[in-house]
Amino acid sequence: MTEEASTNTYPSGLPRPQIPLPKAHPDLLIITGMSGAGRSKAADVASDLGWYVVDNLPPSMLVDMVGVATQMGHLRLAAVVDVRGGRLFADLQEVLDDLASAGVSARIVFLEASDESLVRRFESVRRPHPLQGEGTLLEGIRQERETLAEIRERADIVIDTSDTTVHEFAARFVAELGEDGVGSLLVNLLSFGFRNGVPVDADFVADVRFLDNPHWVPELRALTGLDGRVRDRVLSSDGAEEFLSALTKVLEVALSRYRAHDKHFVAVAVGCTGGRHRSVAIVEETAKRLRDLGYTVRVSHRDMDRDV
């Protein structure tokens, strides 16, 4: 830490907090850059990728955020820090130095765009630039560039969004972070019973009522598709393996393309009559196969605990 950074206050005059060393050092991502260059979109993408995101955070509060969020179990933290904080933004460099001295290193993503692109974006939404004041829009943009010059030099990743669509930017942002495009897509697999209604938010709906129904086997009726005996009976039914292979293949094709269209969540519903036996077993097996392919899968069984 520099001699200047060893004082008890930051440049803004705010007190420098005591930094506890977290037991587990988190990944810290700082999203900053020009207003109108895509910071909000970057924050949304980071959140979809599983980062704990805080927007418009005064830099001096980064230390407390790291401590509290780490205690809560969040080990991937992202903070949007920009000139909206006014004079507080001047603290950012020293805050990053303090965090580094405590063993918490940060990656800085700096977003920029040409003056022409920024002017066009601000005019399209009819909002003033945060540093415009009583001056012109272009004057505000140029003042912001000067304010951000030092942090831009320190950035690990610089992305120019001048000529990119939102989908292209999201893909570039994910790639720059080194995220796995497969793992960053969350697949929600849901079992349900048709007699209780089809889930209204499903992207895919599959019907497995053609499989042998364990409900008509007395010793299996009170059990669910999570029981090994029920699972084995369902998965050994005529057509079960062919259906599972086809469903997995269809989903693999669709999921591989969803990320290119900036889609982060896909809901797949599998239904049988009551939602207790066949659909549960098929969902569990499909989840296993998708996880083996590298996808992040969340499983829920809507009707499994309803009365037989």
Image: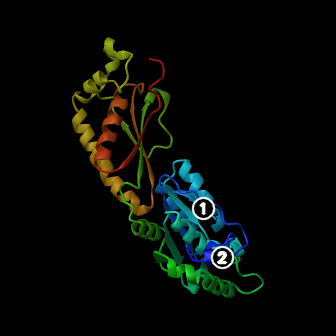
Say if residue 26 shows up in the picture. Answer: yes
Q: Residue at x 55, y 71 (%)?
A: 97
Q: Residue at x 47, y 31 (%)?
A: 302
Q: Is residue 124 above or below residue 241?
A: below
- Does residue 196 appear to the left or right of 145 in the view shown? left
Query: What percent of the width, then of the height, locates residue 21?
Result: 53, 57
Which three-letter amino acid code belongs to the residue tagged 1? Val
In the image shown, does 118 or 254 lie closer to the viewer?
A: 118
Q: Residue at x 29, y 28 (%)?
A: 211
In the image shown, does 96 or 166 lie closer to the viewer?
A: 96
Q: Residues within 10 Å of mark 2 (few under 14, many from 20)?
A: many
In the orientation shown, which residue stands out farthest toward the top?
218
Q: Residues within 10 Å of mark 1 (few under 14, many from 20)?
A: many
Q: Quadrant of residue 241?
A: top left
Q: Which residue is mark 1?
A: 63
Which three-letter amino acid code belongs to the residue tagged 2? Ala
Q: Which residue is mark 2?
A: 90
Say if residue 161 shows up in the picture. Answer: no
Instruction: Describe the element under mark 2 as helix, strand or loop.
Output: helix
Q: How is the image coloured?
A: rainbow
Query: What percent of the width, then of the height, locates residue 218?
Result: 33, 11
- Does residue 283 appear to the left or right of 28 in the view shown? left
